[in-house]
Image (cartoon, grey):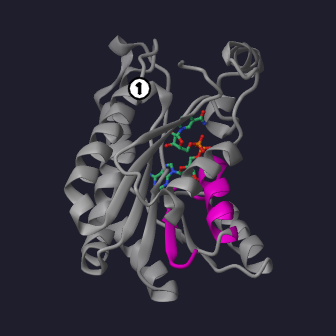
Amino acid sequence: MEGTAFITGGSRGIGRAVARRLAAEGYAVGIDYLQAREAGEALAAEIRSRGGRALAVQGDVADRAAVTAAIRRVEEAFGPVTCLVNNAGIAEQHQFQDISSAFWRRIFAVNVDGAYHTIQAVLPGMIHRKAGTIVNISSIWGQRGASCEVAYSATKAAVIGLTRSLAAELAPSGIRVNCVAPGVIRTDMVAVLGEETLRALAEDTPMGRLGTPEDVAAAVAFLCREESAFVTGQVLTADGGFIL
Ligand code: NDP
């Protein structure tokens, strides 16, 4: 595959696996991060050492100017973004009554506004070229409900709504928009749940294990490939059968 991929939240977890995978498939990759500069730079260096092209850039997706500037830096290095992966996300468990308005606003700013900002930054170019793929990372909690996940679940359902409507709007322009909804994936995000809870979640998964970032990266890569050229507006769940 040729072209430039921009991955938000590419420094750790699922985003890092997506960056590695898309780089291995031939994309030049822009690795966006918020704070983890060292991890982002190390990943870019690792990809370059294998002969790939990668650049780590700082940019808060909630800040339109900052993330747009990060995208432009990557485009100056590698050419226009042809593949956008909206992966940056935050999560916290709270009972609904305890959700502060500051947290409610922040989780929507990152998980939903982030995609709004990045897509608007790359869309004029994609429309001009009549080509492009966008993959948004939702969650099984955007498809199902879960106790103490109201804010997170609402943002991830919003991402699914955004994906479907935008796919309909952009299909005539040759741009595909899809979604991956991961189940429980072993990353820093779920480490806070503790080993006992993670073991129980693995037992509740028909496949008997938690997912890996690579499991999700494989689903993202499929949706970025020409092989999925007739697939748009879809939610590809990668959860080991958790919500069947
Ligand atoms: P991690 O917490 O491991 O990593 C989050 C990544 O997002 C980091 O690279 C972080 O950057 C980045 N990030 C966070 N906030 C911002 C921001 N405002 N601007 C730019 N980057 C930001 O998360 P996961 O890898 O587990 O999750 C990735 C995505 O997958 C998220 O959208 C999450 O909701 C979703 N998901 C995860 C599941 C799981 O079980 N792990 C299940 C379902 C969905 P930095 O390193 O600089 O902090």
**In the figure, residue 191 lies in which quadrant?**
top right
Q: Is mark 1 within 8 Å of ligand 1?
A: no
Q: What's the residue type where badge 1 is placed?
A: Gln
The answer to if 117 sits in the magenta stretch is: no
Q: Nearer the viewer, residue 178 or 150?
A: 178
Measuring 25% from the left and 80% from the top, which residue is drawn there? 128
Q: Which residues are magenta?
A: 1-24
Q: Is residue 87 left or right of residue 172?
A: right
Q: Look at the image and tell me in which quarter the N terminus lies.
A: bottom right
Relative vertical location of residue 143 with respect to residue 48 in this rendering, above or below: above
Q: Is residue 33 visible?
A: no
Ligand 1 shown in quarter: top right
Q: Is residue 158 visible?
A: yes
- Secondary structure at badge 1 equals loop
Q: Which residue is mark 1?
A: 143
Measuring 48% from the left and 56% from the top, which residue is drawn there? 228
Q: Look at the image and tell me in which quarter the C terminus lies.
A: top right
